[in-house]
Amino acid sequence: MPKEFSRSSRVAEQVQRELAELIRLELKDPRVGLITLTGVELTPDYAHAKVFYTTLAEPSARPGIEAGLRAASGFLRRELGRRIRIHTLPQLHFVLDESIERGDRLSRLIDEAVKSDRHQ
């Protein structure tokens, strides 16, 4: 079983690398802008891929980014098929990864708590 896990994780990493390059170099949608892919989760049959991303864009721009990624998913999937040889090419589902933002917010809250503790 560990062999299958490692193959799946290698495929997910390759999908992430190729998608990041495609988005950076080939995608012309102005809504997408600067995003960073943080991970890819593949279903065991490779039929679906959750593609996690972060962005430094304002929260008001996020619906446009999501719409741009959704609109480009067919193009990205087709180009991915030209770069990666796997039996089943996954449907791409883009998901905003809020963990970095959440971690940053928690870090700031901790810093504020420590600072207010020192001032008491």
Image (tube, grey):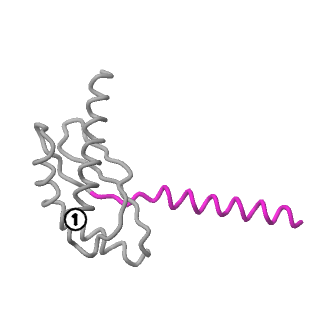
Image quadrant assignment for residue 71: bottom left
At x 56%, y 56%, the residue is 103
Which residue is more in the foreground, 13 or 88? 13
Residue beneath the point at 41% across and 57% down: 97
Label 1's element? Answer: helix
Left or right, 28 with respect to 3, comes to left
Above or below for 61 versus 34: below
Residue at the image point whose x is 71% and y is 61% from the top? 111
Q: Is residue 22 left or right of residue 60?
A: left
Q: Is residue 32 above or below residue 117?
A: below
The front one of 23 and 61 is 23
Residue beneath disc 1: 70
Q: Which three-letter amino acid code belongs to the residue tagged 1?
A: Arg
Magenta residue span: 94-120
Decide if residue 19 is on the left or right side of residue 60: left
Of the pair 9 and 63, the residue shown nearer to us: 9
Magenta region, main secondary structure: helix
Q: Is the N terminus in the top left, top right, bottom left or bottom right quadrant?
A: top left
